[in-house]
Image (spheres, rainbow, N blue to C red):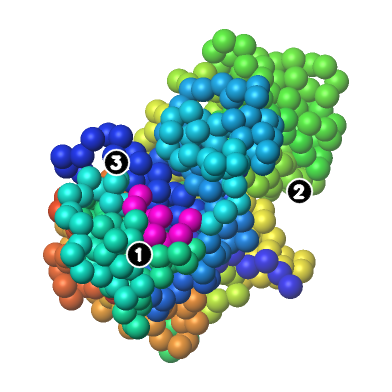
C-alpha cells in the first residue's frame, strides 16, 4: 500500500491554620502510613497532580473521594501492583517508612538496632532507618518484650487516638458509652467519642465501632479526609481528569481540506470550492513572479553531508568544482561555508551552492538525478529532484540550508498538503491555495533563515521528490502534478492583491474568522458555513474527537495548583470555536487563557471545543 500524506492541520505561521508545624507534619505522615503502599524512595511533596486510576477504587466506591484526595495531594501512589489496596491493612514498618520519608530528617542510622529481635540493623532495608529514627524520636514505641513488630497492623482504636492527638482536639471524657463495644471507661473512649461527635465516624450499622479491628486503607482514607477538613485543610476533591470533546483539525481559517474533498465528491469544481471558502476573493492568473524562484528552508546544522544519484557540483563565488556521485561534506569556518568533495577538493565562501544534473541550474537535458538532504528540519531525509541547494551561515553560527526552486511548479510538485488520491477538483483547489499562500512570501527573504518559507507546516509541508513520485512508478504523484499543471499560474486575489489563502484540515461545521484566530479581520477570511467537513463524503477522521487531559495537565495549562471547574466563552457563539476558557481552582483562584492557548498547551486538534467535562 502506498503511503498517502494526510492533510496538514495548519498552513499559517502561528501567531492549615493555627496548628503547629509538628502537628501538620504528623497528620500528613499518618495519611501516608494508612493510605500508601511500600514504595522505594522518598515520598513526593504534596501537590494536586496525579489522578486516581486505581482499579479497586472506582468512581462508585464508598471511599473514592477520600482516596482521590490523597492521591491528588501525592500522599500515596498505591501498591506496587497498581491497586490502592482499599481492603488491606497497613503495617508499623510501612508507617515508619512513610513518616520518615515525609519528614526526611538528616540522620545516620545506628549501627546497633534499637529492636534487635525483629528489626535487623540493615540500612538497605527500606524500614530500618525510619524505625530507628521513630524510636529515637518517641513517635512510635516498641513493646515490653523489646520488639517493634514491624508487620503488625494498626487498629481502628489506635487510629482514633492518633488522629485525636494530631488534630489537637480537646474533648471531655464521655459519661456514656459512645458505641456498644466502646464503654465509657475504655482506653479509646475519649478519642472515639470525639470522632463520633464531629461526624468523622459513625461506626457500623449495628452501633459498634470495632476498636480492635485492623483498619483498612479505605476506612483510614475516609477518616483522614474528614479530620483534615476539621483541621482547616482544603479537602476539595479535584477531577482526576477531564473529557474534552471537539471537532475538526487545525486553526479553522480559510479552506477546509476535508470540506474540499466532500465538495468535489458532490461535483463542485475547484473554482466553486475556492469561491465558497474565500469569497469575495477571486481566482485569476497571477503576476510574472509566480514563475520566479522561491527559497525553502530545509535545515540548520553544524555539519551536513549531501550526496546525489549522479554528478554534483559545488559553486563558491566565481569558482566551481564537480564530482562523480558521492557525498559533499559541508562544515563551518567562522563565517565561511566549507565544502569538501569526495576527492578532497575544498571550496569555501560566504555562500555556497550545490547543483546536480538534469535541473535548470546544471545540464537541463542531462540525466535526471536526485540529491538527499539528511534530517531536514530534524526529521526525515528530504530527496530533491528540482532546484539547487544554497548554504550560508546564519546569525546563530550554524549552516543554513535552503533549496531554491521555481515556485509555480517545482515547489508545488513537492507540496505535501493533500493526499494525491483525492478527487481532481479538490487537488486543483489545493494547488491554487498553496500557490497563493507561497506567493505572498516571495517579496523578500526572511533574515533568520535566508528563505521565503519553511518546509514544515508553520509554512507549508514540503516533501519534494517523495510527493511527486508517490505510488508505484509515481502514479499517485502524477495525479498531484497534473492538478498543479492544470492550474498553472492561477492564484487567489482580492482587490488586485494576492489573497492570504490560509487553509486547514477540517472544521467542526463552520470555519473560523481570521479576527477570531489572529485578531486581524480579513474580508475573505470570514466565518463560513462548512457542513462539508462533516459530510460522509469527506470521510473525515476528525469529525469528532475526545481528549482526556489529566488534572496535572490541566493545572499546568492554566498555571493553577489545581482545576475544579472550567467555563468556555465564545466571541462568536455561532462559529463553535472557543475564544476564552476560564478555570477555577479549589481556593477560588481563576485563570483565563485563549482557546488557541488551550489547544496548544494540551495538544488538542482544534479550538472547536464542544464541551469540557470533569471526570
Please name the residue shown 49% across and 76% down the image. 541
Q: CA distance from mark 1 to mark 3?
A: 18 Å
Q: Nearer the viewer, residue 586 or 170?
A: 170
Of labels 2 and 3, earlier in sequence is: 3
Q: Quadrant of residue 158?
A: bottom left
Q: Looking at the rendered structure, which numbered label has been put on residue 24?
A: 3
Badge 1: few (under 14), some or many (20 or more) residues near its Cα, within 10 Å?
many
Which sits in the foreground, 438 or 527?
Answer: 527
Decide whether residue 160 is among the magenta residues. Answer: yes
- CB under 8 Å between discs 1 and 3: no
Residue 447, image quadrant: top left
For the record, the magenta segment spans 154-162
Q: Which residue is mark 1?
A: 222
Per the model, the C-alpha gap separating discs 2 and 3 is: 77 Å
Determine whether the residue tagged by mark 3 lies in a helix, strand or loop: helix
Q: Which mark is residue 368?
A: 2
Closer to the camera: disc 2 or disc 3?
3
Q: Is residue 321 left or right of residue 101?
A: right
Residue 45: mark? none
Residue placed at 55% from the left, 31% from the top? 132
Amino acid at each position: 500500500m502506498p503511503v498517502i500524506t494526510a492533510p496538514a492541520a495548519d498552513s499559517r505561521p502561528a501567531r492549615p491554620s493555627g496548628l503547629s508545624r509538628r502537628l501538620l507534619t504528623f497528620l500528613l505522615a499518618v495519611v501516608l502510613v494508612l493510605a500508601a503502599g511500600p514504595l522505594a524512595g522518598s515520598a513526593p511533596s504534596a501537590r494536586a497532580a496525579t489522578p486516581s486510576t486505581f482499579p479497586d477504587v472506582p468512581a462508585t466506591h464508598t471511599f473514592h473521594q477520600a482516596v482521590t484526595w490523597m492521591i491528588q495531594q501525592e500522599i500515596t501512589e498505591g501498591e506496587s501492583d497498581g491497586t490502592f489496596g482499599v481492603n488491606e491493612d497497613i503495617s508499623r514498618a510501612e508507617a515508619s517508612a512513610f513518616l520518615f520519608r515525609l519528614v526526611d530528617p538528616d540522620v545516620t542510622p545506628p549501627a546497633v538496632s534499637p529492636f534487635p529481635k525483629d528489626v535487623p540493623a540493615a540500612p538497605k532495608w527500606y524500614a530500618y532507618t525510619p524505625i530507628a529514627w521513630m524510636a529515637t524520636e518517641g513517635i512510635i514505641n516498641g513493646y515490653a518484650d523489646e520488639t517493634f513488630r514491624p508487620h503488625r497492623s494498626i487498629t481502628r482504636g489506635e487510629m482514633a487516638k492518633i488522629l485525636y492527638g494530631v488534630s489537637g482536639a480537646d474533648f471531655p471524657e464521655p459519661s456514656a458509652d459512645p458505641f456498644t463495644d466502646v464503654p465509657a471507661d475504655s482506653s479509646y473512649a475519649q478519642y472515639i467519642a470525639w470522632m463520633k461527635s464531629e461526624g468523622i465516624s459513625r461506626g457500623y450499622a449495628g452501633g459498634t465501632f470495632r476498636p480492635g479491628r485492623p483498619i483498612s486503607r479505605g476506612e483510614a482514607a475516609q477518616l483522614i479526609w474528614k479530620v483534615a477538613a476539621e483541621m482547616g485543610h482544603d479537602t476539595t476533591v479535584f477531577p482526576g481528569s477531564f473529557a474534552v470533546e471537539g471537532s475538526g483539525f487545525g486553526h479553522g481559517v480559510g479552506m477546509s481540506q476535508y470540506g474540499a474533498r466532500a465538495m468535489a465528491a458532490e461535483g463542485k469544481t475547484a473554482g466553486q470550492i475556492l469561491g465558497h471558502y474565500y469569497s469575495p476573493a477571486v481566482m485569476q492568473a497571477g503576476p510574472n513572479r509566480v514563475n520566479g524562484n522561491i527559497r525553502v528552508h530545509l535545515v540548520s546544522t553544524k555539519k551536513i553531508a549531501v550526496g546525489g544519484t549522479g554528478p554534483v557540483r559545488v559553486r563558491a563565488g566565481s569558482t566551481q568544482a564537480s564530482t562523480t556521485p558521492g557525498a559533499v561534506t559541508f562544515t563551518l569556518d567562522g563565517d565561511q561555508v566549507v565544502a569538501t568533495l569526495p576527492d578532497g577538493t575544498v571550496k569555501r565562501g560566504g555562500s555556497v551552492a550545490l547543483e546536480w544534473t538534469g535541473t535548470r541550474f546544471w545540464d537541463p537535458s542531462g540525466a535526471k538525478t536526485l540529491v538527499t538532504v539528511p534530517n531536514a528540519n530534524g526529521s526525515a531525509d528530504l530527496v530533491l529532484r528540482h532546484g539547487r541547494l544554497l548554504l550560508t551561515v546564519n546569525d546563530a553560527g550554524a549552516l543554513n540550508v535552503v533549496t531554491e526552486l521555481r515556485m509555480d511548479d517545482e515547489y508545488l510538485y513537492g507540496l505535501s498538503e493533500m493526499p494525491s488520491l483525492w478527487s481532481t477538483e479538490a487537488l486543483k483547489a489545493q494547488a491554487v491555495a498553496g500557490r497563493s499562500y507561497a506567493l505572498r512570501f516571495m517579496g523578500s527573504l526572511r533574515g533568520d533563515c535566508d528563505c521565503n518559507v519553511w518546509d514544515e507546516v508553520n509554512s507549508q509541508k514540503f516533501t519534494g521528490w517523495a510527493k511527486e513520485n508517490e505510488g508505484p512508478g509515481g502514479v499517485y504523484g502524477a495525479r498531484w502534478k497534473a492538478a498543479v499543471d492544470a492550474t498553472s499560474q492561477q492564484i487567489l486575489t482580492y482587490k488586485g492583491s494576492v489573497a492570504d489563502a490560509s487553509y486547514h484540515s477540517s472544521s467542526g461545521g463552520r470555519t473560523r474568522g481570521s479576527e477570531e484566530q489572529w485578531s486581524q479581520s480579513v474580508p475573505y477570511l470570514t466565518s463560513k458555513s462548512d457542513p462539508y467537513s462533516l459530510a460522509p463524503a469527506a470521510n473525515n477522521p476528525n469529525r469528532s474527537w475526545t481528549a482526556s487531559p489529566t488534572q496535572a495537565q490541566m493545572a499546568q495549562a492554566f498555571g493553577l495548583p489545581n482545576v475544579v471547574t472550567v467555563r468556555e466563552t465564545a466571541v462568536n457563539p455561532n462559529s463553535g470555536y472557543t475564544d476564552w476558557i476560564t478555570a477555577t481552582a479549589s481556593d477560588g483562584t481563576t485563570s483565563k487563557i485563549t482557546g488557541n492557548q488551550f489547544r496548544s498547551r494540551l495538544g488538542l486538534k482544534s479550538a472547536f471545543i464542544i464541551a469540557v467535562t470533569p471526570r
